[in-house]
Image (cartoon, coloured by chain):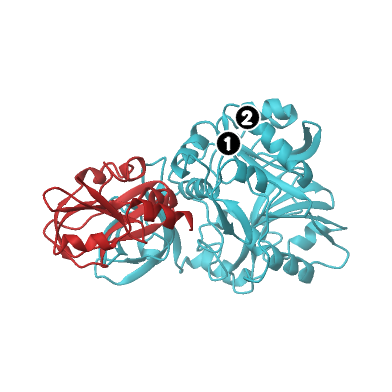
Amino acid sequence: MSDTRFTEDHEWARIEEDGSITVGISNYAQEQLGDVVYVELPDVGKIINAGAEAAVIESVKAAGDVKLPVTGKVIEINERLADEPELVNSSPQDEGWFMKLEPENAQAITNLMDESAYGEYIDKL
Amino acid sequence: MNSREKILRTPLYDLHVELNGKMTPFSGYEMPVNYSRGIIKEHLHTRSHAGLFDVSHMGQVRLTGVNVARSLEYLVPVDIEALALNKQVYAVFSNETGGILDDLIITRWGEDEFFLVFNAACKKQDLAHLEKHLPAEVNIEFLHDRALIALQGPAAMDVMAQLAPAAKDLVFMTGCFTSIEGVECYVSRSGYTGEDGFEISLPADQADRIARFILTFDEVEAIGLGARDSLRLEAGFCLYGHDMDVHTSPIEAGLQWLISKSRRLGGDKQGGFPGADVIFDQMTSLNCKLRVGLLALGKAPIREGTELVNDNSEKIGVVTSGGFGPSLNAPVAMGYVEREYALAGTELKALVRDKQLPVRVSDLPFIPHRYFRG
């Protein structure tokens, strides 16, 4: 069973069955950004701290950064985004994922908002 | 804009909201960045069919008075007296140091009558400039009761043929008074996309009805400011406040073509506009920075403010507009570089997030203009 959590900066993080964490941006975030044209992902093997900039996302109009909700080592990146950055718009929480992490402490993400709490959060924005 | 000033709405505000426009403050107005389909689709639709743009935030002014043409020539490096009836010309208000106060379109409406369209952000300053420098006998009428919409793209002519048959035969940079659905308007064959198209000045209280009517044509979609920006960037046009300002001259901006022969050195009305000495000096020496197109060799967009360096990592320029060009399906930018780096094909590096990304100086426009010249 997967458990997807959300940050106030509109990233999502999901604990996978193997204990890794997949990270991406929410549907709300992609709607705000508009057409995504470029995603800069970190190198596999890089250790990134929670709250640090892990990826850069560029839409037609603007650039934004993606911060990690937990500290971890990058074990896989979504190579498809290099040629198909529009996947972030069409499928933000599935095919448009950014990277997988081996987290220092996977349970840290349970402090984040669950789907219903995040839904309430964005309704107030 | 002063933050205490009330944000304004154009006559098409309700329509933008109905069309699900993503509204954002721009030059003191609440304007749509894009509608439901998004910037890329809106951009491509304009290049393949036709787009309708609300540009009612821009300043529209009517000047009348004896010898108004001559008086205007004190402010712009253009031969206004020679402008024929219903012809338009692109011009800049220059300042004493050769910088650009604003860019504008001037249309001759009569022997002593002209129509000016300038940037929303410069409205107050431009009006003050006109009031200060034009003689008292020139009447300056700010057309606050007029809206302005643009219909741009290869299908614009077919649509215009049905809206106002008289306007479909206009050639680029000419206009005529006509009517659309019974509403008097001034239609010109001009625009800011590089495509064939029209701009329609009409009474503000009729704009909503006419815009909705134009949108009933299958070829036409509403287009927001986001695509307007990417379209003009691909077309190589300057955006005031970004690609030119009081610190750039028309020569540096690559706009020497707008200086009429008669107003140049050796012309029969040589000079006589603010900053003429500086501008002539630059025209002769070209000893100045120059505006260039920039194509990124990678996929990352190069944004405004990005520094440009040479092979020795010395700063030799800066990006003034940059983003993604949907028609090129690649990042596009423009900026200013020192003269020796301005040749098309020159390879430079853009400093993006501590990386040096390769860019190549490119001729402008990126996408060939497709004007109708008859």
Residue at disc 2, secondary structure: helix
The 10 Å Cα crowd at callout 1, few under 14, some 14 to 19, many 20 or more, is many
How many numbered discs, if any? Answer: 2
Rendered view: B49 above or below B324: above
Amino acid type at circle 2 is Met
Q: Position of residue A54 (x, y in %)?
A: 24, 61
Q: Compare residues B14 and B367 and report the one nearer the observer.
A: B14
Rendered view: B111 above or below B208: below
Q: Position of residue B304 (x, y in %)?
A: 43, 62
Rendered view: B266 above or below B19: below
Question: Which chain, by letter, is cyan?
Answer: B
**Left/right of residue B321 with respect to residue B123 in the rendered view:** left
Check disc 1 and report the residue beneath it. B196
Question: Which chain, by letter, is red?
Answer: A
Q: Position of residue B151 (x, y in %)?
A: 62, 38
Q: Which chain is mark 2 on?
A: B
Amino acid type at circle 1 is Asp
Q: Which chain is mark 1 on?
A: B
Badge number at residue B157: 2
The 10 Å Cα crowd at callout 2, few under 14, some 14 to 19, many 20 or more, is many
Circles 2 and 1: CB atoms closer than 8 Å: yes
Badge number at residue A77: none
